[in-house]
Image: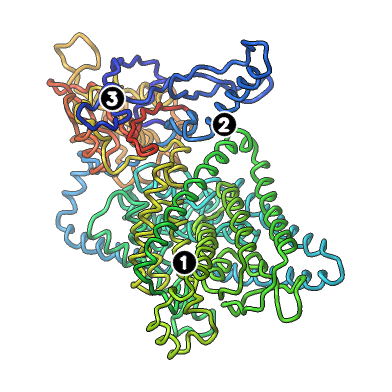
Amino acid sequence: MSDYSSKEKTGAKEKSPKNSVSEKLLGDIPEDGPAHHSFTVTPVRQTSINSGGGSGRKHLAVFEVGEDGDVTDTLTQNSITSLLSAKFRDLSKRWKQYGEESPRFRKRLVSKWESMNYDQIDSQLFQEENNKLKNKSKKKLAVMWVSRWFMMFLVGIGTSLLAAGVHIAVELVAHQKFHLIAKYLDKCSDTGCLMTPVAIWCGINLGISLLAAALVTYVQPTAAGSGIPLIKSYLNGVRVPGLLSLRCFIAKTVGVVLSILGGLACGKEGPMAHSGGIMAAGLGKGRIPWFGRDFKLYNAFRTDHEVRDFVAAGAASGVSAAFGAPVGGTLFSVEEAASFWNTELVWRVFFSAMIACFSTNFLLSAFEGHPTELSHPGLVRFNTFPNLTFDLIEIPVFILMAVIGGLTGALFVVLNYKLTVFRQKYLHRHNWIKVAEAGLVSVVSAVAGFLLMFGVRECTTAKPNSSHAITTSMFCEEGSFNTMSTMFLTTPEGCLKSLLHDPLESYGVLPLVAFIVIFFLLGVWTYGLSVSSGVFIPSLAIGAAWGRLVGMGVVQLFPDQNTPGNISKSLEMRGLLASGSYGAKDVGKYALIGAASQLGGILRTTISLTVIIVECTGDISFGLCIMITLMISKWVGDFFTTGLYDMNVEVSGIPLLSWEPPPLSDNVRVSEFMSHPVLLLMPREKVGHILDILQNETFHGFPIIEQDPSSVLQYKGKLRGIVLRDQLLTLLQKKAFAPEGMKTSVKVSTQEFNDPYPVSQRVSIKDLEITEDEKHCVLDFKPYMNRTPYTVNPDFSMPRVFRLFRGLGLRHLVVIDEDYQPIGMVTRKDLAKYRAGTKRGMLHMEQLTIENV
């Protein structure tokens, strides 16, 4: 449903802006400098294509970018060359539609996304209730202050219990699974029955992954993926149906356990942020939905503003519990997720993240048998690097690695985007295809792991760093084991730790190269499946593998420069060089730099990832190198594509508002991009008229005017307020109307407008039971409408409107003329449809079109 900017269903004619916005917004800034900025928008024209086959075709609106000529298959010359040339051009054009220029999936906004209302409705009813509580206001404020801190404490405790439960379940079951597979691999490598362990491996992966995909696909589809792009959209002010529901929580938490056990290349860190947000939202709403009924506990925090703050704390707590990084979790919520911050909220979020970190530490330490040592602060720890030092001559190597990470990260995003578009166009037409694809990926993962162990017959006697590592001696002599087994007979987290900490002799060049290629492709294929999965750990594992390769090359080229002499002597005195695993043979720091640069190249976050990795390693001395690596990898990746999370947001058509307004848009006025004409209401309207509007229009905000008695036109007068669609639904559901000339006896409180929460998703026009006689009754909006809506005049510039709208978290901004009469409305989609971006280093603007889906 649209907030206000969709005009397709109303038949209202919108005034042509005469390309004024297109003439003023930037297309590409020329290289000769900004002396004359001719600001043009990439042209977007709407066409209609047929989707599907047979007689039941559906017409979908797509948007072709630019004025490329249509490729024709007509043979203009009687030659093989002309035919091949035409076919090649046609193939090239179709391939581009899966890339950045795809009109359907990157150049659109979907009208179904609603905005949340962070602004307080200043109604007559709100003022009356506040006046009654004047004597209790100080006590109420104190109780609310204490309650918020207590709720943040509960969010941290709940997230830690969830994180510990997920981790313990994965570790226990995964250990038994890989122990069984290794047992049959050892046995059958001598007796020639290798098909038996392959069948066991594939069967276990297939059964578990099918269950994981079915749980997400049929229970709650919004639980698919990491959930961070949707959480980011929610905290930006976009309402995502089902994102914070109990069904999504079950599908997300149980699904991520099944996804990892099913052998998919994914992690549980991203889903932990989503799960923490769901738990925090549930605690904030104060109700438990169960089989269609609500068990209401309290309703003090049941507003969009309050729930948003709790979700921000839940996301930070989830990251903190996953990595043992409370500061990094808080910064991640600031940098990647939340859009509205203040000092008090930062303190509460950090408090929740710290509680989650130390509670997880206590629970995991107790699981290991030593609860008082507190040695497991997070689900994923990089452990301590005994020699995490660097020389200034290594900085150029780290910079080169950052460039590699940015390039491979951009390649990851491009391939995943093309695969995502292919899925949406061809594979996601039926739910069973989603489930089958997840099963196929899990089987391919098992087969690929076996083929690498079978084909790359490299053995080693180096002892793995982890005492819980599972290995197989397939095709190896006694006392040695297969190199590839430490990377595939474990979870992705175990693989990451092996690549970071195992001795130099553990892996050769060929096993690492084979692992990088296969795991990179599996990671691209896995992200986007209809399963609960995260991309943190696969990205880190891929980067750690090629970073380890770089470290091996550095050791070969400069065997005496990897560890300075005084550091080596110091380490020898402490016994850290006895095994030969560190010192001149230390490649762990290169694996760490590779992991950081790969993750930065895919996600494009810098500050929070730097702090998270520093907290995970427990060594601040390497922070400079990590920061430089993440910054350069982000810059290189941004030169080619957007980040992975931003790509997901764009594909979904979510109207996300950036931090800053579009560049060079100071001369664009609000009258040029507002939605108009507006649908107006009188202070008193008949119920039948209101029902007709709700049934036929998709708008969510209706300005209230006082009819001008001197005007011959109906619905022309000064603005008196604004009423929301949710309020109309609640008033009609409560039957707060009366016959003409009488006052209603129904009293509606402000709390009832958020019960159930959110009204727009839990109450529809079909749920209203209005008789024919009641349609002639009159509903008075004066006690309930917002009497002081934010307004602007038509001469306001786009940057001022953008900052006002985003800074205050508005849902509607009314445009009025000099007579205080409403002439237009600005909503989120009106601002989000102008998107600024960089492509190959060139700044450009895109004007998106709103698509009804």
Between the residue at mark 3 and the residue at mark 1, the CA separation in whole angstroms equals: 51 Å
- Quick one: quadrant of the N terminus? top left
Checking the image for residue 456, the label placed there is: none
Tell which tag, 1 or 2, sits nearer the viewer.
Answer: 1
Horizontal placement of 178 versus 159: left or right?
Answer: right
Under circle 3, the secondary element is: loop
Q: Looking at the picture, which amino acid does disc 3 mark?
A: Phe
Question: To which quarter of the image does residue 495 belong?
Answer: bottom right
The x and y percentages for residue 286 are 39, 57
The x and y percentages for residue 17 are 28, 17
- The residue pinned by badge 3 equals 673
The x and y percentages for residue 567 are 39, 82
Callout 2 touching callout 3 (CB < 8 Å): no
Question: To which quarter of the image does residue 152 belong?
Answer: bottom left
**Is residue 36 shown to the viewer in this render?**
yes
Q: Residues within 10 Å of mark 3 (few under 14, many from 20)?
A: many
Q: Residues within 10 Å of mark 1 (few under 14, many from 20)?
A: many
Tell which tag, 2 or 3, sits nearer the viewer.
Answer: 2
- The residue pinned by badge 1 equals 590
Horizontal placement of 227 versus 120: left or right?
Answer: right
Residue in the foreground of this view, choosing between 793 and 574: 574
Q: Looking at the picture, which amino acid does disc 2 mark?
A: Trp
Under circle 2, the secondary element is: helix
- The residue pinned by badge 2 equals 95
